[in-house]
């Protein structure tokens, strides 16, 4: 299914940066505690990405070998058969993911914060993992159906990525800073909206992006038949008759991808998805604009998020 | 590689029963806290078993569908292709394992014990996971070599299974009861010895067992070429010339298995493995017999462990 790499596209270690930026903007000064909690979210991401790649039988991520790829390579060098080497690689990645997930918990345990707060932070991380699990299962369920609705896609992307990548890091940073409840909630909700917007941007770039800039092929999502708002919109238009055989075609060539892109533009799917990005980003902005959200939060979070969204604007 | 099902062969929920028996034998009275910690070890086992089955592409465990098998079946019923359904099943099992692993941490968090003890219990669970990961990697590494030594096999089995299944549950029960350090250490070490003994029993039953009693085929381990002390011993004898082509033969028939069993007996491998069981069990007994280990511990632990070991004695 592939897990979108906010953190790759959006700059390295994006999630921990959100935790720390939020924490400091809200007046937090215990950089050690913040670093522990921030690192926990990075390791949660690591665990999810590792296991995602195992599920997808991927031995590379963004063109370089992942953990499974490295271990597969080492086994091949030691004379293992290709099948045994792949098994070795995938096994190492499952184990590495388990260790990372466990370490994410331990980092929050070791953050040194008092009991009630630690418990609350662990709940937030749990929520992140559960949402991600739910999103992943929704994604898999949708793959068994021919056509999902735009709303279902957006909900799936929200659960699968937005919650753990945006909502929970912002929420954790705010909780750690001891922010008042309405600020914590506004940041969590803004994070969710930003996360959805980010994910739709990622989907747009997966088809229309500049490979040189994104480092991501613009054939992969089309070949895989990835379920995105873009495709779900197109599937409800008359353009679908021309698109249907191209979306999910494993050996789609560059010419066919060009045809698909033209059709996705002509039927209004691209414009629709871009509008969806603007809507969610605007909702996030409105939440951050509440008078009781400190100005410092706006000035800290926006520079981290806007460049990612601007990629399609 | 398959993870031996102490808990299947050894009775249901074996690990939590070890935690609680140890705790109560040492005078612990907070049954709620004990239940939380005990359940954490059961969920750790669940997580490891789920991920093991994904690594091994297993959709069944002891003859019944596992999580992956259930989800594969559901997907097939909904019209998925066999390949898509298998993917759906394995994905669900990876996710379920992640949730179980995370829940294991949360259960210890929620056990209500004070900070220092909670931290110590989390360390024990971490140690359990790390040992298991190390054992699994050792197992995979050995599979790339032709012949491992008996000592390496025993060490691998100790890490992979004995630590998390026996050593850590006993240790956790003792810590929770507030036992003095030398009692905690003696129980941990006894658990390790019992775990190794149990694992060798399991390996023996995997070849010589009564399928009606164990519910486990006696062809599986031989077909898989499972690395056990039994096989490692045989590989150092002249009998190996006759055995070599049978161990790891994927389509081994019952007649060939019979030939292998006769050869494993004749070369002394069976007697050697049985002696190894007795040695490790005796070491465990000696540890539990220390005068400063309360009598109640011996009378609680022995009835749980001896029936499992007696299966080959």
Image: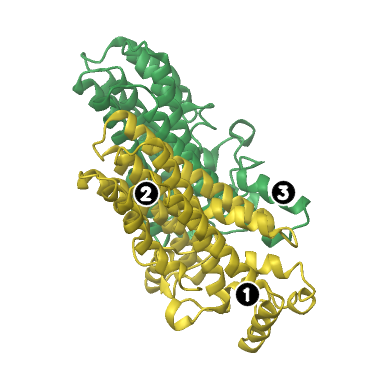
Chain colours: A yellow, B green
- What residue sits right under mark 3 in the picture? B73
Q: Is residue B59 left or right of residue A83?
A: right
x 40%, y 36%: residue: A181
Q: Nearer the viewer, mark 1 or mark 3?
A: 1
The residue singled out by tag 2 in the image is A99
Say if B12 sits above or below B135 in the image: above
On whether disc 2 and disc 1 are found on a single subunit, the reply is: yes
On screen, B95 above or below A86? Answer: above
Task: Residue A66: give x, y in percent of width and height.
Answer: 41, 67
Q: Is disc 2 in contact with disc 3, using a CB cutoff of under 8 Å?
A: no
Q: Residue at x 38, y 43 (%)?
A: A292
Q: Quadrant of residue A261?
A: bottom right
Identify which residue is drawn at 41% across, 14% down: B31
Q: List x then y, in percent, for residue B190.
A: 30, 27
Crowding at dot 2, Cα within 10 Å, few <14 / some 14-19 / many 20+, comes out as some
Disc 1 to disc 3: CB gap under 8 Å: no
Residue A92: percent from left, percent from top: 41, 58
Vertical relation: B268 (above or below) A66: above
- Label 1 neighbour load within 10 Å: few <14, some 14-19, many 20+: many
Q: Nearer the viewer, residue A229 or B222?
A: A229
Q: Secondary structure at mark 1?
A: helix
Disc 1 to disc 3, how far (Cα)? 28 Å
Q: CA distance from mark 2 to mark 3?
A: 30 Å
Residue A32 seen in the figure: yes
**Which of the numbered marks, if any, corresponds to residue A222?**
1
Relative to the observer, which residue lies in front, A128 or A285?
A: A285
Chain ID, mark 2: A
Asked if residue B183 is positioned above or below residue A308 in the image, the reply reads: above
In the picture, measured across the screen, residue A84 lies left or right of residue B191, that is right
């Amino acid at each position: 299914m592939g897990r979108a790499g906010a953190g790759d596209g959006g700059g390295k270690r994006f999630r921990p940066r959100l935790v720390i930026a939020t924490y400091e903007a809200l007046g937090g000064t215990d950089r050690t505690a913040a670093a522990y909690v921030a690192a926990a979210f990075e390791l949660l991401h690591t665990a999810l990405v590792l296991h995602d790649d195992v599920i997808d039988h991927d031995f590379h991520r963004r063109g370089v070998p992942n953990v499974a790829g490295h271990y597969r390579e080492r086994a091949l060098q030691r004379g293992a058969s290709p099948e045994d080497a792949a098994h070795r690689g995938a096994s190492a990645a499952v184990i590495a993911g388990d260790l990372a997930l466990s370490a994410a918990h331990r980092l929050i345990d070791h953050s040194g914060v008092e009991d009630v707060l630690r418990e609350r932070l662990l709940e937030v991380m749990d929520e992140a993992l559960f949402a991600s699990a739910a999103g992943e299962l929704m994604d898999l369920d949708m793959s068994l159906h021919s056509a999902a609705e735009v709303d279902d896609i957006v909900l799936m992307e929200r659960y699968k990525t937005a919650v753990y990548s945006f909502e929970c890091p912002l929420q954790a940073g705010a909780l750690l800073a001891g922010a008042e409840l309405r600020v914590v909630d506004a940041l969590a909700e803004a994070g969710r909206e930003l996360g959805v917007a980010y994910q739709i941007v990622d989907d747009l770039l997966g088809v229309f992006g500049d490979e040189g800039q994104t480092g991501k092929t613009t054939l992969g999502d089309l070949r895989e038949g990835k379920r995105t708002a873009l495709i779900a919109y197109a599937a409800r238009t008359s353009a679908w008759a021309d698109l249907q055989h191209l979306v999910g075609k494993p050996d789609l060539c560059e010419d066919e991808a060009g045809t698909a892109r033209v059709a996705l533009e002509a039927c209004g799917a691209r414009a629709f998805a871009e509008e969806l990005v603007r809507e969610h980003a605007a909702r996030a902005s409105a939440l951050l604009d509440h008078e009781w959200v400190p100005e410092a939060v706006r000035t800290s979070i926006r520079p981290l998020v806007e460049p990612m969204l601007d990629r399609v604007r």
